[in-house]
Amino acid sequence: MAYPTDYRYTKDHEWVQVNGDIATVGITDHAQHELGDVVFVELPVPGVQVVAGKTFGTVESVKAVSDIYAPVSGEVTKSNGDLQNAPQRINEDPHAQGWLIKIHLSNPAEVNALMDAAAYEAYIATQSKEASA
Amino acid sequence: MESVSTPPITEPRKTPLNAVHRRLGAKMVNFGGWDMPVEYPATGGLIAEHRAVRSSVGVFDVSHMGDIRIRSGKAPGQALAAVQHITMNDASKLVIGQAQYSAMLYPEGTFVDDVIVHRLGEDDFLLVINAGTREKDVDWVQQNTKNFDCVVENLSDDYTQLAIQGPRAQELLQKLTDADLAPIKNYSFTHGIVCGLKNILIARTGYTGEDGFEIYVPSDVATSEMVWSRVLEAGKEFGIIPCGLGARNTLRLESKMALYGHEISESINVWEAGLERYCKMDKGDFIGRAALERAKAAPQTRALVGLEMCERGIARDGYCCCNEAGAQIGIVTSGSPSPTLGKNIALAYVPPAMTALGTPVYVQIRAQKCKAQVVATPFYKRPKKVTPQAASS
């Protein structure tokens, strides 16, 4: 799966897409593949403040619980309610329909510190090399 | 999100089929010091593997498990006496060709390991033990059978062990063996030619709650790979897929089968674990018997129950259990989503007063206490075989 070039990416495998002062956040294709079939998602309700680098929720497969880290800071404006009954969207369409939350950015400059698509793809390539060693 | 895999600290051990699992693109995990497949994403992954076993057939590499053979020395009867001394079930009830679920206990009545005891002969027993406890168990058996005239052999590295599990398992395996599988009862075994290999142990045992067989073939890589691919080939018509430890765990949990280090351990006794039906106090003395007698007379402080989550949330291994007042009263030993039931289930130790069906138990899941209730176990029981009616005249 291609990594959208207008998204930015974190070392913890979250993506963020910015539209004005609203950011949409999800986990990457690499992350959903590592996790396996998603069966449960715990997300914050609108109004909650998230802080870049701190956890804001969890995504769970049968075997694993994964904390999700906010790539940017701000206030949650929306949470993807579809994921309660259709958590598999995260596996099927991690970069679009599998989005997790929308944030009203408190510090838009934070996005600049994140990796672009090329850097992220290089990053996961090195991770795979280490894992199979 | 945090990384799901962690790098190994010491070099993990590998089964003879390790290269095969990696070629199949399996997700590998360190389990008890073994580099094992947890699931095979290319053929569907954990949930698909679980469903394949329940509906048709799947195959597991369980070569990481261990094997200890105990045979009488010069005097007959010594192997049986040794096995009776170190295990809690009654091995004298086994005919040749029969196996039983049992356990080796510490003098305190707690678990060294659970084990399947196979009676290979009058004076010949095979104990199949857990992967993580191989060395501990071998040492324990050697130390505690010194006073018997018997020979103890660690055969763990001699076998590749495959578990073929599911309602179509017999049909599949019958294609590969000259042994007549239909008459083999549950927990019985035979020897026969499998994939052209002579004298292969074929046991109607397993850890999934489905019908199935475990076969023990020579552990050289070429033979192991040959048998594995023959099984997958023969299983194609049944939709077989390779299955990993992830599905192995969800299957055994639904069937309420204990996992060492979780439901049973060196700090849990037989009564607490609810395994009294495998503990034959009347068979004669055995290691742990005296402590179990004393424990029977004393008030029990905890008991193993099944839980079903009522509120959103997945109870997992090691999560705390609380009562309605919020006080911690127990712990989850194993917990997971159940692919067959579509619910989140768990096994947990709770006070005896809270074991009645329907009792609410609150599981601490991160910041929240989520409600669960005590339910009957096993959570899943395989459908009884329907015998075909005789044709009516």
Image (cartoon, helix red, strand yellow):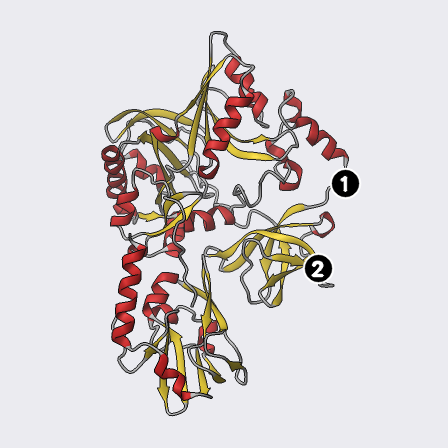
Residue at which label 1 appears: B299
Q: Mark 1: which secondary structure?
A: loop
Q: Position of residue B347 (x, y in %)?
A: 58, 50
Residue type at mark 1: give it.
Pro
Relative to B354, say whether B131 is above or below: above
In front: B170, or B45?
B45
Residue B393 visible to the viewer: no
Count of numbered circles on the image:
2
Q: Earlier in the sequence, mark 1 or mark 2?
A: 1
- Inspect this view and state whether residue B55 appears: yes
| Residue B353 percent location from the top left of the image | 74, 50
User: Mark 1 Cα within 10 Å, few/some/many (few <14, many 20+)?
Assistant: few
Q: Amino acid at mark 2?
A: Asn
Give the residue drawn at x 50%, y 16%. Answer: B79
Callout 1: chain: B
Mark 2: which secondary structure?
loop
Position above or below: B116 against B25: above
In contact (CB < 8 Å): disc 1 and disc 2: no
Q: Which mark is residue B323?
A: 2
For the N terminus of chain B, give its image quadrant: bottom left
Q: Position of residue B134 (x, y in %)?
A: 45, 33
